Image: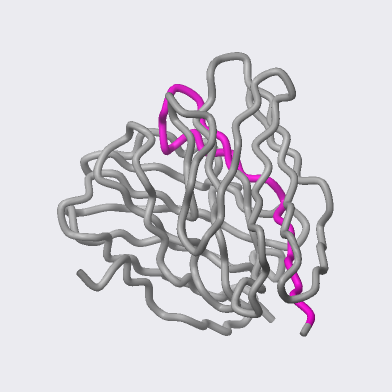
Amino acid sequence: DAGVIQSPRHEVTEMGQEVTLRCKPISGHNSLFWYRQTMMRGLELLIYFNNNVPIDDSGMPEDRFSAKMPNASFSTLKIQPSEPRDSAVYFCASSSDDRGIEAFFGQGTRLTVV
Amino acid sequence: AQSVTQLGSHVSVSEGALVLLRCNYSSSVPPYLFWYVQYPNQGLQLLLKYTTGATLVKGINGFEAEFKKSETSFHLTKPSAHMSDAAEYFCAVSVGGSNYKLTFGKGTLLTVNP
């Protein structure tokens, strides 16, 4: 398996623009997570999907952030409008269930908002 | 709520020396504990995990960790450091064995000197 695939790897955008990050989880995994990593706050869980349904989005910073999982093989994280403080590395991870089994991480998308 | 404290944001060792990365956790219920490694510009990779049973857990690349309930610790060790071990290491705790409740520490950057 190719692992969790995220695109793009790097994104530079201007403040106010819409940004869409994409994730393809490992085939057969039914749990998907979006994390944000910054120097100040470390790794934070933004949202968790189980069987394509958002279970917990309490980590989403504000209404500018939204995430979807239209099917088991694809998820998006959208920021609209983007702000410089959104600059971070965004990771997608997936696991085969929710019972403490290993979560596999993608390589991340480094977002820079200027 | 659970929490993780990693003592030392940066640890430097010589090649061949003992590696010790410290992690203390707080949890009101029996925790699942994890160590992840992150190489530059990469996602997180699971090194090892403790769920139940034997408190000394062996992972990949010669690393091991011991769960000590009385000390609420889960320190990561490796007898002899290799240059390729240079990376950032994250301790994480989950409650109820749920991946989506993973809480990460701030990370420890390991430098290995020749």
Q: Which residue is at a point 63% across and 67% down the rendered structure image?
A: A88
Relative side of A55 to A34, left or right = left
The one of A43 and A104 positioned closer to us in this rendering: A104
Question: Which residue range is magenta in the image?
Answer: B92-113
**Residue B88 on image: x %, y %:** 66, 65
Q: How is the image coloured?
A: one colour
Image height check: is B109 above or below A28? below
Please identify the residue farthest to the top as the structure is shown: B28
**Residue A100 on image: x %, y %:** 38, 35
Q: Which residue is at a point 27% across and 60% down the rendered structure image?
A: A25
Q: Is residue A79 visible?
A: no
Q: Which residue is at a point 65% across and 48% down the rendered structure image?
A: B76
Image height check: is B82 above or below B80? below
**Residue B34 on image: x %, y %:** 53, 43
**Residue A90 on image: x %, y %:** 52, 64
Residue B5 appears in which quarter of the rendering?
A: top right
Marker count (numbered): 0
The one of A21 and B3 positioned closer to us in this rendering: B3
Q: Is residue B23 visible?
A: yes
Q: Quadrant of the C terminus of chain A?
A: bottom right
The one of B6 and B22 positioned closer to us in this rendering: B22
Image height check: is A63 above or below A10? above
Q: Which residue is at a point 50% across and 30% down the rendered structure image?
A: B32
Q: Quadrant of the N terminus of chain A?
A: bottom left
- Queried whether the magenta region covers residue A95, the answer comes back as no
